[in-house]
Amino acid sequence: MRRIVPVFVLCLSLLTGCTPAPQPTPSLEGETVCPAPSSAVPESPTSLTRDEVPAWISCRIVDGAEEGELLLAELDRPLNDRELNHHDGKSVYRLPLAGETVTEMVPISVYLDGQPARFSDLKDGMNVEVSFNGVVMETFPAQLGEAYELHAYSIGTEQSPGGSFYDLCGLYLQVLSDLWSTDHGLNSDISLAGLDLSKAPGGLLESEKTALCWRFGEKHGVEVIQGTYEELAEEGRFVSLSDDPEHPLYHWEDGCLFSITAAQGHEEETDSLPVLFFDAQKWRSPLGAYFFEDCSVVWPERGTWSGYQVGNQAIS
């Protein structure tokens, strides 16, 4: 036994010393590339070699730029000459720019008007393009499997020209929040809210209406459904207060209907700058409603709104 032990130890030493070293991996071009150590920092998405062609979507930031939690409404047109993989103009996406939900291996790169930028350079209302791996998670709002790059465009660029209702979603979110907090007793105990944007002026896309509906509910902790007064009544959401079928009166016991419509009487008014006229109201019953009437807001030539004026307020 005394002679066997040294030989056994020697054999183990030889086996350890003969362990093969990691072999270099050939690249797609036939060159030899040594594997990076596990502690190496991953390259940026723009320098990675990818076998697949990334998918692209064109969207508008509805809300969340300040917090780095983007709520995106898909546009109904491409911003650039790219083939879009998702392009129905109706989808809503959630894109977090920081936190555990963003992949740690390939962080998203941000560009503003073609130049590298920071997350803090993004603003609500900006038009953006996002490249990703083509995977869309079936949640609501939808989430992208792995985002590579985000290209944003500021006011005055070809992709985001001035002279329009820039950040219209941000304006309507502010109006709805103001209406929510005014005469708060009307909606303090509701579990459901209706939102009617079917006649809201300014040309909201279907994706923007859906995004506004979801964000409004998220901010105030209620479930929000889209629908007009007539549609919700037909669905049986309201309690009837009248037996007259020709002149029905309704009451919404556990909900409140919010709506934004175009203000009347301003069709002939013109201005050198974009001006929007609208009314906003919340309704719960014939004797439970509040109105913002004859509201107006002006956009600068290459900027966004800074507030709105309420012509009259009324209660019933």
Image (cartoon, helix red, strand yellow):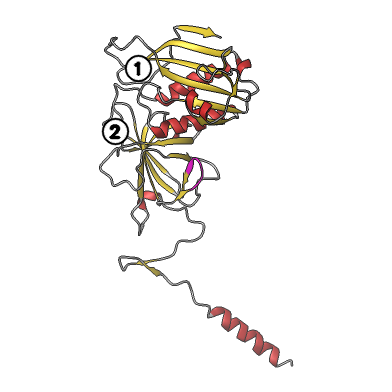
Region rendered in magenta: 138-142
Q: Nearer the viewer, residue 122 or 78?
A: 78
User: Which residue corresponds to mark 2?
Assistant: 159
At 35% from the left and 26% from the top, the residue drawn is 203
Q: Nearer the viewer, residue 118 or 16?
A: 118
Position of 146 compared to 238: left or right? left
Q: Amino acid at mark 1?
A: Trp
Residue 301 drawn above or below residue 161: above
The reply to whether callout 2 and callout 1 are in contact (CB within 8 Å) is no
The image quadrant where one finds the C terminus is top right
User: Which residue corresponds to mark 1?
Assistant: 299
Residue 309 drawn above or below residue 84: above
Choose the circle earlier in sequence order: 2 or 1: 2
Name the secondary structure under disc 1.
loop
| Number of marks in the rendered image | 2
Name the secondary structure under disc 2.
loop
Q: Callout 2: 10 Å neighbours few (<14), some, many (20+)?
A: some
Picture quadrant where residue 252 is located: top right
Can see residue 122?
A: no
Residue 7: image location, x then y, percent:
65, 89
Q: Amino acid at mark 2?
A: Gln
Residue 65: image location, x then y, percent:
46, 31
Q: Callout 1: 10 Å neighbours few (<14), some, many (20+)?
A: some
Picture quadrant where residue 32 is located: bottom left
Position of 238 compared to 262: left or right? right
At 46% from the left and 33% from the top, the residue drawn is 211
Q: Is residue 235 in the magenta section?
A: no
Can see residue 11?
A: yes
Residue 117 drawn above or below residue 10: above
Residue furthest out toward the right: 1
Residue 77: image location, x then y, percent:
30, 37
